[in-house]
Amino acid sequence: MSPSSSPRPEGPLRSVLWSLVAAGVMAAAGVAVVGLSCLLGYLSGLALLPGFLAIVLGTGLLIAGLHEGGRRGVPGLEEDGVVYGFITAMIASMLGFILGMPLVEYRRVSWGEQREVTVADAASHSEATLLRLRDGRLDARNVFTRTHIHSGKNTAWYEHAVVPVFPAVWRPGEPVRVWAVCEDFDEAGKQECLDAWRTSSSWGVVIAPRELPCYERTVPTQYAPPDGRVVFVRWTESPEAYKRALEAKAFSMLRGLGVAWCVLSGLYLVFTSRARWRREKA
């Protein structure tokens, strides 16, 4: 029997195989969309760019799925292309928006300036990204919190917290110019912040300027310098440890939404294949 006359899958099996092919193609295209969106977001330093770019490219996947499915002439493939395209576009867009902030923060820390300073001089170097403090001690026993509302499309409440980093020589009543921060000191994030503050370290990642309003009002009046010159840092074991934590968070998000894509696509494949099998056998 010649290769050209070899049997091909027909009927329900052929439809299922083509649906699997469509799912695989869309999965590969989705990975490419997320990768390109995140790369451009990282290079540009724009946190929202990956999400919006993924929406545009994901819409292209949806249209391509519709066109290719209709062109093949396989029953149900046009519908498969649309559904897999929609699922992929939705997951890719979500990943783009979720990964935007960690990507930009990773870029800021990777490309930012590092300086070694004393605690007393740290406030004069707030434009740096990483500070290594030659002296001082972080007092994790004095935690000051304040509830802050992040307004926007989805209003969120955060319990921001700060702890003082005292210079080597400090007397009660003197101002404190360096503060270690915690983004959300609720039940979920409290222990993580306490563990970071208890780390034997001298490294601090200076918070981005957009975050200043979240913490400036958290500093108690009795500790606030009269001239307002303070610096807020995220306490970390080292710059590498901080970046590893960002990477772990990003990969956790990737795994979670990757599983979501597999579940949604798998459920669609199972139920539609079963329905088509019954219909074609009837």
Image: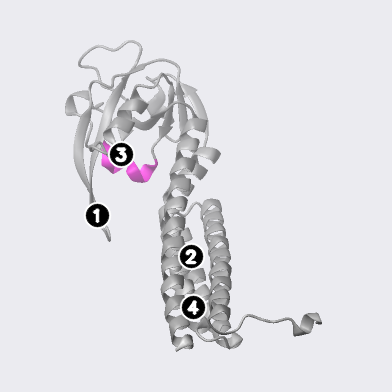
Q: Depth check: 11 or 90 in front?
A: 11
Q: Quadrant of residue 168?
A: top left
Q: Contact, CB < 8 Å: mark 2 with mark 4?
A: no
Q: In this picture, which residue range is highlighted in magenta? A: 208-215
**Vertical comparison of 59 with 202: above or below:** below
Q: Depth check: 236 or 195 in front?
A: 195
Q: Depth check: 204 or 23 in front?
A: 23
**Within the magenta stretch, is there residue 213?**
yes
Viewer-side label of 1, 3: 3
Q: What amino acid is at disc 2?
A: Ala
Q: Contact, CB < 8 Å: mark 2 with mark 3?
A: no
Q: Earlier in the sequence, mark 2 or mark 3?
A: 2
Which disc number belongs to residue 151? 1
- Residue 49 percent location from the top left of the image: 47, 60
Q: Contact, CB < 8 Å: mark 2 with mark 1?
A: no
What's the magenta bit mostly, secondary-structure-wise?
helix
Which residue lies under the disc numbered 4?
A: 80
Q: Earlier in the sequence, mark 1 or mark 3?
A: 1
Which residue lies under the disc numbered 2?
A: 54
Residue 229 appears in the figure: no
Which disc number belongs to residue 183? 3
| Label 2 – label 1 distance at C-alpha | 24 Å
Crowd class of label 3 (few under 14; some 14 to 19; many from 20; radius 10 Å): some
Viewer-side label of 2, 4: 4
